[in-house]
Image (spheres, rainbow, N blue to C red):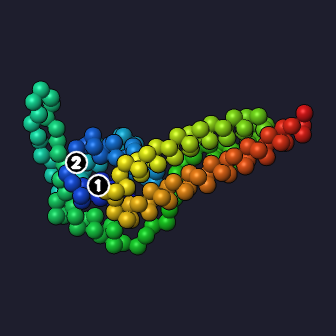
Amino acid sequence: MNSQDVILGMLMKEALTGYQIKQLLENVFSNFYSSSYGTIYPTLSRIEKEGLITKESVLQDGKPNKNLLNITPKGRDCFNAYLLAPLEGDSIRKSDFMMRLYFGEFVGYDKVIIWLKQAQEESNTKLDQLLEQYSLYKDEMHPAQVICIQIGIEEYKAKLTTIAEGLVSLEQLVQEQS
């Protein structure tokens, strides 16, 4: 799976602008796919040159023209080939939090507790955002999309449970040392 596959998948349903693709990557897809802003437009340019998408300039009153991106039959074939290929193994995104947590023995309990609380806050925010998106769009979603979002929700809940248990454990250790 790469940015091309994700973008072509988005365009299977409807034509989108580059901005709309960026928004989807930052919101819905950020829970299971990591892509930087710097890869979106080069990928769009490349797949347009390869004939997988076309760009249609749409005139707007009082605003700059917007480019509406459409998938071509060749792009549909390419995306379908991706969908029908064997599943790739999941990869864990890079996590500075997890790396620091693993080496937490070198900084002491107080610093690890700070990291856990920060990760707890960020995970709560992401869970809330995912729950909000789910409640807004669940009626329009395909059952496979619902399952995907539910997996994301359950992963955040499991992470939050583990963090909460870890905080209790570490805070008890700090009290015992006092």
| Kind of residue at badge 1 | Met
The quadrant in which residue 104 appears is top right
Instruction: Judge by depth and name the residue closer to the eye, 66 or 160.
Output: 160
The quadrant in which residue 107 appears is top right
Horizontal arrangement in the rendering, residue 152 relative to residue 80 (left or right): right
The CA span between labels 1 and 2 is 8 Å
Q: Residue at x 34, y 68 (%)?
A: 83
Q: In this orientation, does residue 45 appear?
A: no
- Residue receiving disc 2: 16
| Kind of residue at badge 2 | Leu
Q: Is residue 61 above or below residue 57?
A: above
| Element assignment for label 1 | helix
Q: Are marks 1 and 2 in contact (CB under 8 Å)?
A: yes
Residue 69 spot, x, y in % from top left: 19, 49
Upstream in sequence: badge 1 or badge 2: 1
- Residue receiving disc 1: 10
Q: How many marks?
A: 2
Q: Is residue 146 above or below residue 64?
A: below
